[in-house]
Image (spheres, rainbow, N blue to C red):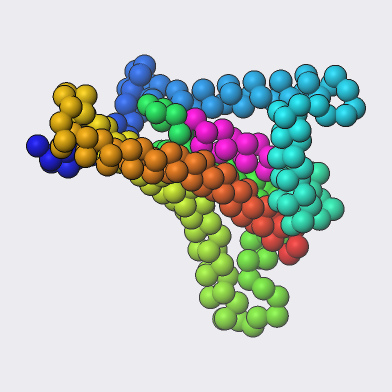
Amino acid sequence: MNPLDKLSGEMDELLEGFMSHAIVGDTTVGLTNYIFWMCVALALLLACVLMFKKRQARGLVPQGIFVNGMEYVVEFVRDDMCKSILGDTWKRHFPFLAAIFFFIVCNSIVGVIPGCHPGTGTIGVTAALAFCSFTYFIVVGCKRMGILGYIKSLAPKGVSFPMNVLVWAIELVSTFLRLITLAVRLFCNMFAGHVVMGTFAILASLFVEPLLQGFSAAALGQAGASVFWVVLLIIIYLVEILVGIIQAYVFTLLSAVYIQLVESE
């Protein structure tokens, strides 16, 4: 039997596995599989932070791969996503931007573990992240210019009536579109990556299954194909980790840019 004949049924089970399932209560108010693994990612992040601070306090010179690696990532967020974009106000916004970056990265790492369903794999969590970023830069703009001042700033100065009304309406829609694009971009990339990893895992298992049932020339040929899919699966896993880091970088970078825009008005 051709292993690919089972692919359709396996893919249906894979997509079903990506659905949100309630662990406690129901999917509306209870604890779902995605929220559970999001909490695991948060616990992992908290443990890493506490371990980092504890080891860092042992001396002025950082020692060990873990401490040096964490310091490098923190400095990367500080220099490349805060100082370079926000300038003198970077200290004010660094805790928020660093929290977003590390939260997404931790969920991405948890997401490559077979059977896990990280929070960034569901639109609800990515929408909540986008709403936090959206609310943050709106509040920054309102604090700086006042509520009416921020609303007026959507229309650039020097544009005469009635063109300024049209520009203001376009900018208002554009501002709210940032909320949608932040949420959808992160969700689609994470979900697509999980589907690709699951597909390659299914292909590897389908081709190695005949070999476990008995040795034959056909089974050995399919085993060779399975090795090929396993190698690709490993590569996809590495790429997925990289994609998760890139998506955390893009989300945090865009948040910093939106903050800088309202501060420069």
Quarter of the image with the C terminus in it: bottom right
| Residue that sits furthest to the left in the current view | 1
Indicate whether 139 appears above or below 227: below
Q: Position of residue 159 (x, y in %)?
A: 65, 80
Asked where in the image residue 62 lies, by quadrant, the reply is top right
Residue in the foreground of this view, choosing between 227 and 88: 227
What residue appears at the point 22 percent right and 38 percent down from the top-left corner? 222
Asked where in the image residue 94 lies, by quadrant, the reply is top right
Indicate whether 134 appears above or below 3: below
What residue appears at the point 51 percent right and 37 percent down from the top-left corner? 108
Residue in the foreground of this view, choosing between 207 and 73: 207
- The answer to whether residue 218 is magenta is no
Instruction: Describe residue 136's horizontal placement relative to residue 194 as left or right.
Output: right
Q: Position of residue 190 (x, y in %)?
A: 44, 44
What residue appears at the point 54 percent right and 48 percent down from the top-left corner? 247
Q: Magenta residues, as a range?
A: 97-111
- The answer to whether residue 103 is magenta is yes
Residue in the foreground of this view, choosing between 209 and 143: 209
What residue appears at the point 37 percent right and 26 percent down from the top-left corner? 115
